[in-house]
Image: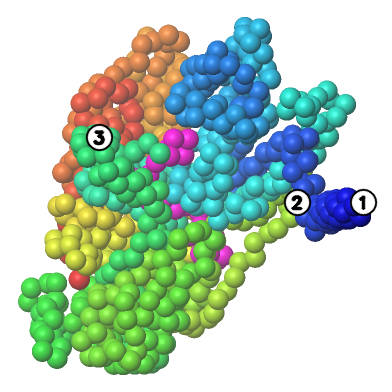
Amino acid sequence: MQTRPSKRMATRAALAMAGLSLAFLYGIGALIYAGLINGEENRLKAERNQLSDTQIAAERGTIYDSNMNVLAKSASAWLVYINPSQIKDDTQKELVVNGLSQILGVDADSVRTKAEKTKTGYQKIAGEVETDVKEALEAYIDENSDNKLSTIIGIDPDTKRYYPYSSFASTIIGFTNSDDQGVGGIEMQYDDDLTGVSGRIITAKNAQQGSMSSDYETTYDAKPGESLVLTIDEVIQYYLEQGLEQALVDTGAKYAYGIVMDTDTGAILGMTSKPDFDLNNPRKISNAALSETIAAITDDTQRAQETTNALYAQWRNRTISDTYEPGSVFKTVVVSAALEEGVVDLNTTYTCTGGIQVADNYQRCWKPGGHGHETLTQGLMNSCNPFFITIGQALGEERFNKYFEAFGFTEKTGIDLPAEAKPVAGKTYHALESMGISELSSSSFGQTFQVSPIQMITAVNTIANGGKLMQPYVVDSKLDSDGNVVYKTTPTVKRQVISEKTASTVADMMEQVVSIGTGKNAYVAGYHVAGKTGTSEKIGIEGAYIASFAGFAPADNPEISILIAIDEPPGEHGGGAVAAPIASMLLEKIMTYLNVEPQYEDDELSNISSVAPSLVGKSVGDAKVSAAKFTVKVVGSGTKVISQTPAAGQQMRTGGVIVVYTEENAAKQTATVPNLCNMSMSQANSAAVNAGFNIRLSGTTNSGEVLSYKQSVNAGEEAEIGSVITVYFKSNVDVQDG
């Protein structure tokens, strides 16, 4: 009778022991799993609960121009965040939401959403906060100390990117987003170099997830990024931007872009795409009319899409990302190849009758009736398409393709900027295997294929520097945080494309294009400009053209190469009429800035300006003797000259007006500036002198048929008598090109 209970007890004991054993084994297994197998993950979880790890943004490197002027710089700012786990009630939450939204100018609903994530310990609210805003926020926190906002709202060091010149060189520099990452341009291309290494502040947290005292804090300092010195020259860039900005106003074109390159090295001295944008406010559409049009769109999705399209369009660096048919500018490449291969020489002639038969098509010359009998140089000067079709056919497909590739048109240039257009055989240019007589003929005068502006100027620069194809670049050097050079760009010669002799021959031909050919409006007295104009119809857009000019100066010893393109001018659209005059203005300014001494030919001396003599301190009688070549107007009753207009050394024409003042406080004499446009040189000079002003001639002044088209002081404005007004001239005769 007693054995059954004993058995039951034994069974129960065995089961209990088995259960304990299993529990023990499970516990051991869990410990092993947690400590060994999953130990690292659990350790990190514990650290996250016990430690606050805050990142300190590294100061982004500075971007300088070639003269060490600051183009982009980071400065101290602040980052504001919240710890939602510390919010205990709705009163605290609403104080946080209202305070942050009002002081920081952020969306209240966004702050509320983050504040309601009560299981998290960190939610970023805003970065790049200015010091005055940070101080206002600190005052708000103090005002609400009873609600312990200091345990919820945190403020850490941050940096903010500044661009001192707003839109200056915007498509080259690019900008940074809210995470301090580069977007476009140099900021994107060299993001890793500029960024540096972030620092950290590690602080222990208590059981309520609040920060403990500084005794439990460890700080790792941030390492600043490297700074960059660009090849861009602030002065040249300014001239280029100013010139193309005005070109948009004068021509009504859709876009304008240009590049200035150092001939010897390939360094980019200036580059711009207009219109551009404000680097400090890159997400604002710079075109006011376009912005209004988009704002009027009622459909939210469509409006958002059009806004995105507009922003990407204004950020686009068209000099490297766009492609276009180069038109007649490309004839410089064709004649270089033909001379190098010996299929033509300077004695080669052609008789242009107005067109030429190519397969089933009759290809017309741009000049009705043709150019008649031409030498090779005259063919380039006249931009004669039939002549160049015969040159291309003489080269043949294989040799044409050989030089097309050698001049760099089948590959990227390798410029150190993002989003360079990639040439694609069969799409942007004719592949050798698919090139027939029609494709060869049209390509010979720059049509039916596309290149980028950076490719085109690099090819023309090859002619300028003795046949060497250079790799273009925009970063000259990198500096560490102490200003030490840690990297210096070495100019890269990619290959010798043509001989120095051929390059020199073509340069001489291009100088004559500017002296008396279709490029005459790019002429600059004393600087012997070499160049070629181009006019091309845009593919797929009937009646839309790109007018361009590419060249270099001085022709006999080139220092810079230049390319100007005016995209979709609504009226006059020829490269010789539209782009060449802009190139002339820019080349004159740049050559003067670079201290290139002008070398005037005898026939140029009669048109160049004289220099105002120094008359200050002389008696009125002596002043008149010293300025015998000019008309002297005396203001005041004194006996000695106190001041003069124009100032001594300023350029003015012989026979012009010099106003001398003989009393200290004599009122400056003014007059209304006359309209000096649409006049010959002599007419403009007479009109200016009769009104009491002087003129300085600029542009094409070596041709009898030129007319003035622009003046530096607008007609109708009041200006001091004796002031020098620059009047620009151009020709409208024989400046067309195919």
Q: Residue at x 45, y 81 (%)?
A: 406
Helix or strand or loop: what does disc 2 sit on? helix
Q: Amino acid at mark 2?
A: Glu
Q: Residue at x 64, y 16 (%)?
A: 149
Q: Is residue 601 left or right of residue 359?
A: right
Closest to the observer, 403 or 682: 403
Magenta stretch holds residue 183 = no
Q: Quadrant of the C terminus?
A: bottom left
Q: Residue at x 32, y 62 (%)?
A: 549
Q: Amino acid at mark 3?
A: Ala
Closest to the observer, 607 or 364: 364
Helix or strand or loop: what does disc 1 sit on? loop
Q: Is residue 266 left or right of residue 628?
A: right
Q: Amino acid at mark 1?
A: Gln
Location of mark 1 (residue):
2
Furthest residue in direction front, as rendered: 1
Magenta stretch holds residue 274 = yes
Q: Residues within 10 Å of mark 2 (few under 14, many from 20)?
A: few
Closest to the observer, 142 or 83: 83
Q: Is residue 106 above or below residue 249?
A: above
Closest to the observer, 335 or 474: 474
Q: Is residue 737 left or right of residue 139?
A: left
Location of mark 3 (residue):
295
Where is residue 166 drawn, in percent x and y? 46, 36
Range drawn in magenta: 261-282
Q: Which tag is nearer the camera, tag 2 or tag 3?
A: 2
Q: Which tag is nearer the camera, tag 3 or tag 1?
A: 1
Q: Residue at x 19, y 66 (%)?
A: 540
Location of mark 2 (residue):
41
Helix or strand or loop: what does disc 3 sit on? helix
- State whether residue 735 appears in this view: no
